[in-house]
Image (cartoon, rainbow, N blue to C red):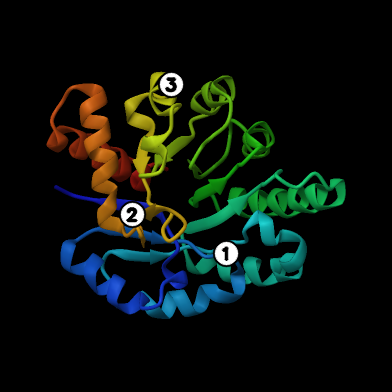
Amino acid sequence: MRLFDTHFHLDLYPDPSMLVAQADQAQTYVVAVTNTPSVFESTQQLTSSSQFVRPALGLHPELAVERQLELPLFERLLPQTRYVGEVGLDFVTTDARDRAIQQEVFQKIIALCQASGDKILTVHSRRAEKEVIQAIGPEFAGQAILHWYSGPLSVARQAVENGLYFSLNPAMVRSKRFNELLAVIPRERLLLETDGPFVQIGSRPAVPQDTMIVIRALAASWHISEEQVAQTLFTNFRQLLTKE
């Protein structure tokens, strides 16, 4: 059973090298997201010898105001990776200036990725789902994944129409909205994530192998075997990587 994790904060763990080794041993594909461009190169070094873990270049929306001056660094590093994340918008803040800066930063990132044409984005959209989908647009040249989607179902439908993917994590399967979300997202648009260490499994942070929790929940919801679910999602992941 092939596992993968499209959103994992490798650099926030006490022993990231051990987690890289575990992913390689288990042959689990992992996208190691970063929250600022300044930590990308250290994550790149951590994963340089891995066959299965790839570093992503990020600028988290909650850090956009503080780290907006790292945008030139983001632009310089972008050619070194196909993976971009964590990026997006977070409108938990009600400060109009902060929201405006977040949007300026995200729009710049989208423009840079659009020009490259082959990037795969994992995107944060908390309380800004409509604005995120509008910023990406229906003609985005790369691929975009809505990470831990928690917005309106009507906006999710628009994201589906625009060709976006959705990644599911173990915390989401515990939500009352989980099955409602599944009802509006086609199976071929679903992917796996953990968002570890922010998602916890009991008293410990999630690791990529915990994507099995999502597979089990989908098997129960879809009334098919775990193996069938895993194959469907891995096919989605493979198609994401090969789309032009």
Q: Position of residue 224 (x, y in %)?
A: 16, 25
Q: What secondary structure is marked by label 1? A: loop
CB atoms at circles 1 and 2 under 8 Å apart? no
For the point 68% across and 62% down, the residue is 63
Say few, some or many: other residues with alpha carbon within 10 Å of mark 3 (under 14 / 14 to 19 / 20 or more): few
Three-letter amino acid code of the residue under disc 2: Gly
| Disc with the residue nearer the chain's start (1 vs 3) | 1
Q: Which residue is mark 3?
A: 180
Point out which mark residue 35 bears.
1
Which disc number belongs to residue 202?
Answer: 2
Residue visible at 75% across and 47% down? 93
Kindly state the secondary structure of the residue where label 2 is placed.
loop
Q: Is residue 72 above or below residue 114?
A: below
- What number is the disc on residue 113? none
233 in relation to 184, above or below: below
Of the two numbered discs 2 and 3 on the same chain, state the one appearing first in sequence. 3
Q: Quadrant of the C terminus?
A: top left
Q: What kind of residue is marked 3?
A: Glu
